[in-house]
Amino acid sequence: MDTIWLSGAEWLAVLRIGLGLWWLESWRHKDKKTWFEGAGIAWAAGVAGNHRWEVVRRGFDVVVKPRPRTMAHVVAYAELALGLGLILGFLTPIALVGGLLLSVLYLVLMIHDWAEQGQNSMMALISVVGLFGMSWQTWSVDSALGLF
């Protein structure tokens, strides 16, 4: 593979690190006090309640709605873990699959919001490219430890 400036593996590492920074920013910009009190989940409940797909409404009501504080912590700390894992390149394939799943869940929930669709579809695409491109080969803890 011919590239300019960096090798192909290094460009994939740049993409992985950039995705990690994106997840870290998703965590950083949240007002944690309000988020952990349930504001984010309450907003998502309104979105899910008006969703055109019954499976989304029912799934949200069964999984998320009964435990808003727990789910607020799960979402926030998943974003933090994904960001740090991808930036450091630690357990990278797991982080990429987790990020892909979280992006797809967000995408499905926000199917009516074009701005969210763009962000989450791009994050999902980068996760797929990073996974199949084995973006943990360079500049990663995984590479240093000989994992994967």
Image (tube, helix red, strand yellow):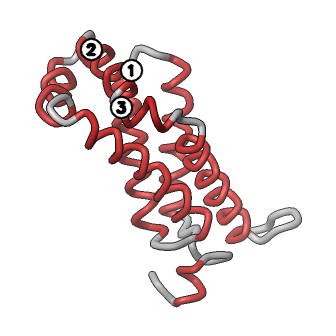
Left or right, 128 with respect to 98, comes to: right
Residue at point 19%, 36% (across, down) = 67
Q: Looking at the picture, which amino acid does disc 2 mark? A: His
- Establish if 93 lies above or below 42: below
Whichever of callouts 2 and 3 sits on the residue coming sooner in the sequence is 3
Q: Residues within 10 Å of mark 1 (few under 14, many from 20)?
A: some
Q: How many numbered circles does the render carry?
A: 3
| Label 3 secondary element | loop
Residue at point 25%, 33% (across, down) = 68
Residue with the mark numbered 2? 51
Left or right, 77 with respect to 64, comes to: right
Circles 1 and 2: CB atoms closer than 8 Å: yes
Image quadrant occupied by the N terminus: bottom right
Q: Where does residue 52 sit, x and y in percent of width and height?
A: 25, 12
Whichever of callouts 3 and 1 sits on the residue coming sooner in the sequence is 3
The label number, if any, that marks residue 37 in the structure image: 3
Q: Residues within 10 Å of mark 2 (few under 14, many from 20)?
A: some
Q: Looking at the picture, which amino acid does disc 3 mark? A: Glu
Q: Looking at the picture, which amino acid does disc 1 mark? A: Ile
Residue with the mark numbered 1? 111
- Establish if 142 lies above or below 120: below
Whichever of callouts 1 and 2 sits on the residue coming sooner in the sequence is 2
Mark 3 vs mark 1, foreground winner is 3
